[in-house]
C-alpha cells in the first residue's frame, strides 16, 4: 500500500488510549469517532489525525451515517470498536463498506448473551440451563423443569448491569410485564452459585497465542448489586483450574468465530459439582484495569498488542506476539468515600500500580510467588473495606 492505512476507532467511552498510540506508532492514520461529551477528553491527540463526534445516545445507524460521510474524503481501511457497546456499530459499518473484520452475525456471538450461549452449547461447552425471553409457554415449561433461582439477564448489556434475580415463576411474569416490548432483549438462566474466573487471550489467525487465567474474589454481579471490594488475581499456572480454563477458552473462541484480536471470557466453577460453566465473553480488552494487571504479570499490554494485530492486517504485514514473561499479579479496587484516597499506608514492595481515579482506591501488586499475591489481596481487601469502601446503587445502564 503506497499510502498509510486509515483505521477508524469508535469509542463511546474514554478508553483504549494505548491502542490509539500504538496504531499511530505502527504507521497507521488514526481517525477517532467518539461521543460529544468526550470531545475534550484526555485522548492522545498526537496520535490522532482526525476526530469526529456523534450524539451521546447514538445508535449504530447514526455512527454508520457519520462514517459514510467521512469516507467521501478519506480512504478507510479498517474499523475498530474500542468498547463493547460500540461493537454493533463497527460491525454495521464493516458490512456496509465491505471491510474486513467481524460482521454482524459473528459480532452477535461476542455481544448477545443468548447467541453466545447457543453457540457454546452447540460446541459442547457446558453452560447453565437457559432460554430466551421469547415464547411464554416455553418459558413456563423451562421454569417447571429447572431448579431455581434464576437470573433474568439483558442480552446485550455488560458488567452485570440490569440483571434481576427470579425466585419463583410469578417474579418472572411481573418482570416481563414491567419490561413490556423490551422483554425479548432478555434471557433467563439458572443461577449457579460458585466462584467466577476470567481468561484473557490474544488470538491471531484462529491460533490462541496467549492466555492468562484469573480468579475474581467476590463475583462481579454481587459487587455491582451490593458493593464491596473488587479483587482479581493470576491463577497458579500449573493448577488444575488454570489448565481447565485455558482448555475451555481455546475451545470456545474458534466456535464463536474469533479470527484475530483480544478477548475477555468469564466462567464459573459450580459449588455443587466443581464443574466449570461458560458465562459470557467479549471481543475486547477486559475492564477494571485488567489490561494493567496483564501487563504486570505477562509483559503484554492487550491494548497495544491488539493494535499491533490491527496494524499488521491493515499493512499486510506478518505478526508475532511481543516478548513476554510469567509472573503473578493481583488487583484490589473499591469505590471510595474520599475524593482523593490516601494510600500512603500501603507501602509493600510488591505494589506496582496505584489507581489514578477520583473517589476510587486501587492497587496492583506483582510477585513471582502466587501465594504472596494471594496474601496481599486478602489483607488489602479487609483494610480497603475499613479505610475506603463506599457504595452506590447499581446503574440501570452503563455510564462512562
Image (cartoon, rainbow, N blue to C red):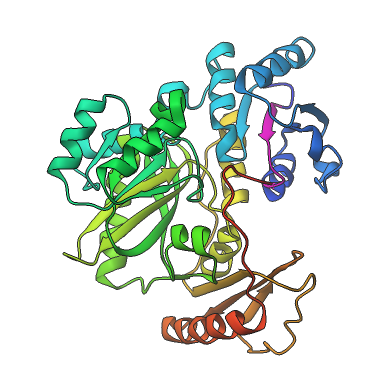
Q: What is the quadrant of residue 181 in the picture?
A: top left
Tell which of 58 and 119 is nearer to you.
58
Let me know if residue 111 appears in the view. Answer: yes
Tell which of 129 and 61 is nearer to you.
129
169 in magenta: no
Q: Quadrant of the N terminus?
A: top right
Q: Residue at x 20, y 34 (%)?
A: 140
**Vertically, is 106 above or below 240?**
above
Q: Residue furthest left?
A: 145
Residue 202: give x, y in percent of width and height. Answer: 46, 49
Q: Is residue 236 left or right of residue 89?
A: left
Q: Is residue 360 left or right of residue 232?
A: right
Q: Residue at x 82, y 45 (%)?
A: 41
**Vertically, is 341 above or below 73?**
below
Residue 124: give x, y in percent of width and height. Answer: 18, 42
Residue 291: give x, y in percent of width and height. Answer: 58, 58
Q: Is residue 40 left or right of residue 368?
A: right
Tell which of 148 and 360 is nearer to you.
148
Tell which of 325 and 144 is nearer to you.
144
Let me know if residue 113 appears in the view. Answer: no
**Vertically, is 107 above or below 345?**
above
Q: What is the quadrant of residue 257 in the picture?
A: top left
Q: Residue at x 63, y 81 (%)?
A: 351
9 in magenta: yes
The magenta-colored residue range is: 5-16
Amino acid at each position: 500500500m503506497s499510502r498509510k492505512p486509515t483505521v477508524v476507532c469508535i469509542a463511546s467511552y474514554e478508553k483504549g488510549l494505548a491502542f490509539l498510540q500504538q496504531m499511530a506508532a505502527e504507521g497507521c492514520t488514526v481517525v477517532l469517532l467518539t461521543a460529544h461529551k468526550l470531545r475534550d477528553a484526555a485522548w492522545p491527540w498526537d496520535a490522532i489525525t482526525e476526530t469526529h463526534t456523534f450524539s451521546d445516545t447514538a445508535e449504530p445507524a447514526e455512527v454508520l451515517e457519520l462514517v459514510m460521510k467521512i469516507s467521501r474524503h478519506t480512504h478507510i481501511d479498517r474499523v475498530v470498536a474500542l468498547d463493547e457497546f460500540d461493537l454493533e456499530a463497527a460491525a454495521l459499518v464493516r458490512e456496509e463498506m465491505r471491510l474486513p473484520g467481524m460482521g454482524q452475525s459473528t459480532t452477535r456471538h461476542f455481544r448477545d448473551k443468548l447467541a453466545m450461549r447457543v453457540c457454546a452449547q452447540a460446541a459442547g461447552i457446558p453452560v447453565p440451563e437457559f432460554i430466551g425471553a421469547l415464547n411464554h409457554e416455553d418459558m413456563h415449561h423451562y421454569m417447571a423443569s429447572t431448579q431455581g433461582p434464576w437470573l433474568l439477564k439483558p442480552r446485550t448489556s455488560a458488567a452485570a448491569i440490569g440483571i434481576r434475580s427470579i425466585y419463583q415463576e410469578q417474579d418472572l411474569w411481573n418482570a416481563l410485564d414491567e419490561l413490556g416490548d423490551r422483554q425479548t432483549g432478555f434471557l433467563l438462566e439458572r443461577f449457579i452459585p460458585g466462584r467466577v474466573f476470567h481468561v484473557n487471550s490474544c488470538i491471531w489467525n484462529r491460533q490462541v497465542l496467549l492466555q492468562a487465567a484469573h480468579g475474581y474474589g467476590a463475583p462481579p454481579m454481587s459487587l455491582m448489586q451490593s458493593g464491596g471490594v473488587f479483587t482479581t488475581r493470576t491463577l497458579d499456572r500449573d493448577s488444575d483450574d488454570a489448565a481447565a480454563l485455558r482448555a475451555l477458552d481455546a475451545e470456545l473462541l474458534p466456535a464463536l468465530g474469533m479470527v484475530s484480536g483480544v478477548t475477555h471470557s468469564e466462567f464459573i466453577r459450580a459449588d455443587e459439582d466443581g464443574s466449570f460453566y461458560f458465562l459470557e465473553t467479549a471481543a475486547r480488552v477486559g475492564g477494571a484495569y485488567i489490561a494493567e494487571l496483564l501487563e504486570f504479570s505477562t509483559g503484554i499490554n492487550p491494548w497495544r498488542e491488539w493494535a499491533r494485530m490491527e496494524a499488521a492486517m491493515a499493512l499486510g504485514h506478518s505478526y508475532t506476539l511481543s516478548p513476554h514473561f510469567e509472573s503473578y499479579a493481583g488487583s484490589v479496587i473499591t469505590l471510595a468515600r474520599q475524593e482523593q484516597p490516601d494510600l500512603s499506608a500501603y507501602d509493600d514492595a510488591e505494589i506496582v500500580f496505584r489507581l489514578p481515579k477520583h473517589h476510587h482506591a486501587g492497587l496492583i501488586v506483582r510477585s513471582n510467588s502466587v501465594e504472596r499475591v494471594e496474601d496481599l489481596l486478602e489483607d488489602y481487601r479487609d483494610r480497603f473495606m475499613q479505610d475506603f469502601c463506599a457504595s452506590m446503587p447499581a446503574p440501570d445502564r452503563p455510564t462512562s
